Amino acid sequence: MRTPLVYATFASVALGATTCYLPDGTEAANFTTCNAGAANSACCTSSDACLSNGFCLQQDGLSNRIIRGACTDKTFVSSACPQHCKDVAPNVPISIYLAYDAEPQGNFCCRTAYNVTSNSCTTSTEDSTDPFQLSAGTVIYDRATGAQLPETWNDTSPVATVVTVTATPSAGAQKSSSNITAVAAGIAVPLGVLLLAALAGCGILWKQLQKAKRGQVAMAEAPAVPEKPQDGMYYGAASPNAGYDQYAYGHIAHRPELPVNDGIVAEAPTEREIPLADSRSIQK
């Protein structure tokens, strides 16, 4: 289905002096004319895009929906007014839904969806539930004059992100260029600051990791630390080497050895002559 696409967001609109009306004749609040210079004109909200076929293309909320809006002709007889769904909920703007894709522009239903079982719209318009076709519509980019996008425009053509629509297209184009520059600068500066902050954080973290690694290596290579004596004693020994080994961090492991007594070795007893008792009698 060939449907109009909108690549421009309308920031401001040249307002017409004509009042806009809904199909029931009540004034349409927040609607402005799509062609202020014409005797009669379709009307859309300032946030939506006007289409040359009298309908609106919604940009807020559920975007890219076709809307039957309002018209400056209170009776909706003028061909400038939307010609479908005028009798459906005439006191409010309504959505128009695609029933199914068909040449040339597709078939549509008013307000509600298409029933595939009955092959009909669930809401009737002009006493019919048959889907209807819409004429092709192009975007009106200047509401003061009703000027439309050129026929040579396509989706590869450069289009400004922000367009200010005024009675003088050249002035709008100049303001659009300055807006684009301001937006680009506003995005680039915060991104640059965030990048520098991230790099600085990575550098600090790297230095801390290197410092911690050096501390671990130094601890692993540290010499053994002897136990400090308590009251001149090494846990039951008079000296640090009497039957004990000392290891790093003060841990002591017992090493069973024969005690050393200052080089003095006890001599084993030798055989000696034992005097016998005198067998003579003792005289009293």
Image (spheres, rainbow, N blue to C red):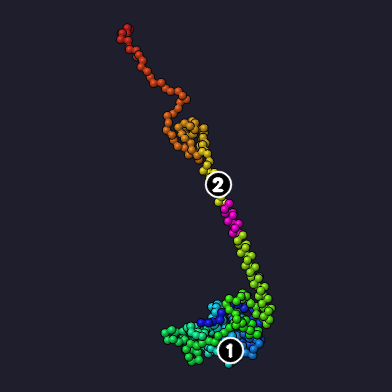
Q: Please, what is the three-letter code of the amino acid marked with disc 2?
A: Arg
Q: Position of residue 71 (x, y in %)?
A: 60, 88
For this rendering, which residue is in front, 46 or 119?
119
Residue 251: say if magenta: no
Q: Report the front residue among 191 and 229.
A: 191
Q: In this view of the protein, can residue 252 be seen by the observer?
A: yes
Q: Is residue 81 above or below residue 47?
A: below
Q: Residue furthest front?
A: 152
Magenta part of the chain? 197-207
Q: Quadrant of residue 56?
A: bottom right
Q: Residues within 10 Å of mark 1 (few under 14, many from 20)?
A: many
Residue drawn at x 68%, y 76% as measured from the top left: 174
Q: CA distance from mark 1 to mark 2?
A: 81 Å
Of the two numbered discs 1 and 2 on the same chain, state the one appearing first in sequence. Answer: 1
Residue 86 coordinates in the image, percent (x, y): 54, 89
Label drawn at residue 81: 1
Which residue: 57% across, 77% down? 155
Q: Is residue 203 rendered magenta in the image?
A: yes
Q: Residues within 10 Å of mark 2 (few under 14, many from 20)?
A: few
Outermost residue to the top: 283
Which residue corresponds to the image point at 49% horizontal and 31% vertical from the top-left?
239
Q: Residue at x 64, y 89 (%)?
A: 38
Q: Which mark is residue 214?
A: 2
Residue 185 coordinates in the image, percent (x, y): 65, 68
- Circle 2 sits in a helix, a strand or a loop, which is it? helix
Q: Nearer the viewer, residue 82 or 241?
A: 82
Instruction: Look at the magenta stretch and give its main secondary structure.
Output: helix
- Which of 207 and 169 lies nearest the eye of the viewer? 169
Residue 232 relative to residue 148: left or right: left
